């Protein structure tokens, strides 16, 4: 390519794999190692080897312009896209939608994993998933068969954020014939000296404290998947659940047990999420998860009915978020009204509107009593582990509310359910198993009250 770029020494293995036609690369490289750089330059070559469309996908479309389109290489003072795609190679540059058309007919565009389904009809031959650990994993699930069908390639680049979907795809690639998987820490590449790295660690700890600063360094420079996820809403609690053996491979649902409860976070353009809970003597079994976007209430009613029937699950309660009462111009009846008609007024409830801080506190309390079926809830568990507050570098504090991204939907749905479990469901109180409050006698209610039965009102 006529841009004067060549890979650094530690990038050569990955570069040779990609130049030889490799179709699946997982590059877990440390901060400032040139992950986006090598991916952009490989895309530039690919665009002139095969006329097709190519994408560079960030977790959110809103961050794509700053992170890639307008980004400047501090070493050269040039925009990164101008270095990778010199103007002489272009026929058109469309700033509005961050799209370049090359003189041979190939195209390249910056997109977001949060709105991948808005790009229906496109058939990219190459996709770079930048900051893959923070991206919506549903984007890969949707796009993978498209890329496979047209003989394309995928590059996943990121630093770790716990053992979420990025860890799983890395491990899968390690056992996948023809794939390339590589973890490069800052101690492997020589980009920084040992003294510089020691200084970086000390600086992180001095600025952000031992726990947060240490975790940030381990993520960004040591590529440690077991480091605490910075800002994770339930990270510590989910780590404890795994350590205590409460995340089980499969088979958690008990057909002879209590009826299941379902909590939800509704959305049409955004993802709708549904958790299936089964009250047990020792707490709650989380025995199912569903999530998808682009579906309305009637679609979900049909899917939930089929889901419950296929698994022999009896429905106890179905909780909808408070805004399910809201009407839209597109439909005559609210989602709440449609679910009432389908499942009955004795089963469908609205979760009261509360502060998000209260919901998070409920989730942290209730998750301690939960066991999870990993096979039935894998995508939801990834969401719970990735649900996070953003860290504001300028103010050195976490945001007051979690980031609104793909992980916030399973997080919200779980927190709604946690509130209602505390309010309405008794997991371990009377002989005969867990029951709803309305099914208990007055004497049984006294036994489970905060006074332990010592005080009558």
Image: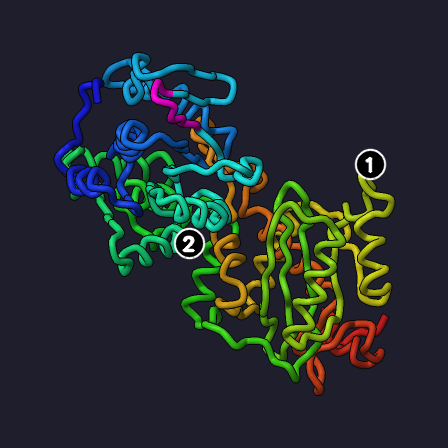
Image position, residue 252 (x, y; %): 54, 76
Left or right: 188, with 441 as reference point? left
The structure residue drawn at horizontal position 53% and vertical position 63%, both measured from the top left corner, is 377
Task: From the image, state whether disc 2 or disc 1 is nearer to you.
Answer: 1
Q: Is 103 part of what is drawn in magenta?
A: yes
Left or right: 305, with 412 as reference point? right
The structure residue drawn at horizontal position 42% and vertical position 53%, both measured from the top left corner, is 165
In terms of secondary structure, where does tag 2 sit?
loop
Q: Residues within 10 Å of mark 2 (few under 14, many from 20)?
A: many
Image position, residue 175 (x, y; %): 27, 60
The structure residue drawn at horizontal position 83% and vertical position 72%, both measured from the top left corner, is 438
Q: Give the answer, above or below, for where 208 lies relative to 364.
A: above
In terms of secondary structure, where does tag 1 sit?
loop
| Segment colored magenta | 102-109
Image position, residue 312 (x, y; %): 67, 77
Where does the C terminus fall, quadrant-wise?
bottom right
The structure residue drawn at horizontal position 54% and vertical position 35%, both measured from the top left corner, is 119
Q: Residues within 10 Å of mark 1 (few under 14, many from 20)?
A: few
Q: Quadrant of residue 423?
A: bottom right
| Callout 2–callout 1 Cβ contact below 8 Å | no
Where does the N terminus fall, quadrant-wise?
top left
Q: Quadrant of residue 126?
A: top left
- Count the labels in the image: 2
Residue matched to label 1: 329
- What mark, if any, has residue 164 been given in the picture? 2
> 325 or 399: which is nearer to us?
325
Distance between mark 2 and mark 1 Cα atoms? 38 Å
Q: Quadrant of residue 287?
A: bottom right
> 456 or 170: which is nearer to us?
170
> 403 or 299: which is nearer to us?
299
Q: Give the answer, above or below, for where 237 lies relative to 152.
A: below
């Amino acid at each position: 390519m006529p841009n004067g770029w060549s890979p650094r020494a530690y990038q050569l293995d990955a570069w040779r794999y990609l130049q030889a036609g490799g179709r699946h690369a997982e590059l877990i490289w440390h901060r400032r190692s040139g992950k986006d750089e090598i991916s952009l330059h490989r895309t530039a070559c690919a665009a002139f080897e095969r006329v097709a469309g190519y994408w560079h996908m960030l977790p959110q479309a809103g961050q794509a312009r700053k992170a890639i389109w307008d980004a400047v290489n501090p070493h050269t003072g040039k925009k990164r896209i101008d270095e990778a795609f010199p103007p002489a190679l272009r026929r058109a540059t469309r700033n509005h939608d961050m799209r370049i058309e090359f003189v041979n007919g190939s195209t390249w565009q910056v997109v977001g994993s949060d709105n991948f389904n808005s790009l229906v009809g496109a058939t990219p031959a190459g996709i770079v998933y930048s900051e893959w650990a923070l991206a919506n994993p549903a984007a890969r699930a949707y796009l993978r068969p498209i890329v496979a069908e047209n003989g394309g390639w995928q590059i996943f680049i990121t630093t770790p954020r716990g053992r979420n979907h990025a860890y799983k795809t890395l491990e899968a690639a390690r056992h996948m014939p023809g794939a390339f998987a590589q973890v490069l820490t800052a101690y492997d590449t020589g980009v920084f000296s040992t003294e510089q790295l020691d200084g970086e660690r000390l600086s992180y700890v001095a600025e952000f404290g031992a726990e947060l600063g240490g975790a940030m360094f381990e993520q960004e420079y040591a590529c440690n998947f077991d480091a605490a996820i910075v800002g994770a809403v339930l990270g510590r609690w989910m780590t404890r659940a795994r350590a205590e053996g409460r995340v089980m491979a499969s088979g958690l649902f008990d057909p002879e047990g209590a009826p299941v409860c379902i909590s939800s976070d509704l959305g049409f353009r955004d993802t709708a999420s549904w958790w299936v809970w089964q009250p047990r003597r020792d707490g709650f079994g989380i025995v199912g998860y569903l999530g998808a976007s682009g579906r309305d209430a009637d679609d979900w009613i049909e899917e939930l009915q089929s889901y419950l029937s296929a698994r022999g699950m009896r429905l106890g309660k179905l909780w909808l978020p408070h805004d399910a009462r809201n009407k839209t111009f597109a439909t005559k009846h609210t989602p709440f009204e449609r679910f009432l008609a389908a499942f009955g007024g004795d089963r469908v409830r609205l979760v009261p509107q509360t502060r998000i801080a209260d919901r998070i506190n409920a989730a942290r309390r209730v998750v301690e009593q939960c066991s999870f079926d990993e096979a039935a809830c894998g995508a939801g568990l990834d969401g719970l582990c990735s649900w996070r507050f953003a860290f504001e570098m300028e103010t050195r504090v976490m945001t007051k509310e979690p980031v609104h991204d793909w992980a916030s939907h399973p997080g919200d749905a779980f927190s709604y359910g946690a509130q209602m479990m505390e309010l309405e469901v008794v997991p371990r109180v009377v002989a005969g198993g867990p029951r709803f409050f309305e099914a208990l006698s007055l004497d049984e209610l006294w036994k489970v009250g905060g006074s332990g039965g010592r005080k009558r009102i």
